[in-house]
Image (cartoon, helix red, strand yellow):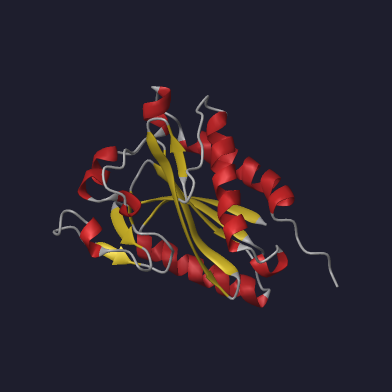
Amino acid sequence: MIVKSLGIVEYSSAFALQEQIADEVNKGYSPETVLLLEHDPVYTIGRGGCGDNVLDQTIQAIRISRGGDVTYHGPGQLVGYPILNLRKRGGDLRHYLRFLEEVLISVVADFGVKAFRVAGKTGVWTDQGKLAAIGVGVRHWITMHGFAMNVNNDLSAFSFINPCGMTACPIASLKKLCGRHITMEEVKSLVTGRFTQLLIDWLPENDPD
């Protein structure tokens, strides 16, 4: 598995890159890959998401193939797109979602932030609000999409939507929780390390036939 750290990438360009890598991983041409990046400001709606959760109808929201409802991406938010082959890692999508949550919970603990899961929901929460959204898509057991964790981004952008379809959902960021600016490179480094480490225990490769 390799991790590619990118800068700010326009959403459609990042999606095209995901699709290209996913096709190559499925065919065995490329190794599993994790893309770590930021987006220009954009709202996206997952499969089955409700357009009514976009409160400002002047906002354009892009329909995409991940699970979940509406969310916001923008500079200062770390977006991770793991492109993994779940065929060789147990084929359990729910377990994969819990793995992504565990990676982020472990990362923010290094900043002194206590984060947790909420029963029946996907994502990462703190006592001040939701810190990270998670929504994935799977085709031929190859994963796409992933997680978005608020680091230093402007949280006011979430006021124009019901994040993940939840009304009155408070949103948190690492900057808000820690009371200081957090560098994106520091967070990327921690995510890379924890993802690689926890992948071995949570999603080990199947024994070869």
Query: Where does the N terminus fall, quadrant-wise?
Result: bottom right
Q: How many marks?
A: 0
The residue that appears at 56% across and 68% down in the rendered structure is 21
In the foreground, 58 or 188 = 58
Query: Where does the C terminus fall, quadrant-wise?
Result: bottom right
Residue 83 in percent (x, y) is at: 57, 62
Q: Quadrant of residue 15?
A: bottom left
The residue that appears at 24% across and 40% down in the rendered structure is 156
Q: Quadrant of residue 61?
A: bottom left
The residue that appears at 63% across and 41% down in the rendered structure is 194
The residue that appears at 35% across and 68% down in the rendered structure is 48
Residue at the front extreme, as displayed:
119
Residue 104 in percent (x, y) is at: 54, 41
Q: Is residue 101 left or right of residue 53?
A: right
Residue 26 in percent (x, y) is at: 63, 74
Residue 4 in view (yes/no): yes
Residue at the top extreme, as displayed:
179
Q: Is residue 64 left or right of residue 146?
A: left
Q: Is residue 133 left or right of residue 112?
A: left
In the foreground, 186 or 146 = 146
Check the image and report above or below for 142 versus 3. below
Residue 72 in view (yes/no): no
Residue 195 in percent (x, y) is at: 63, 46
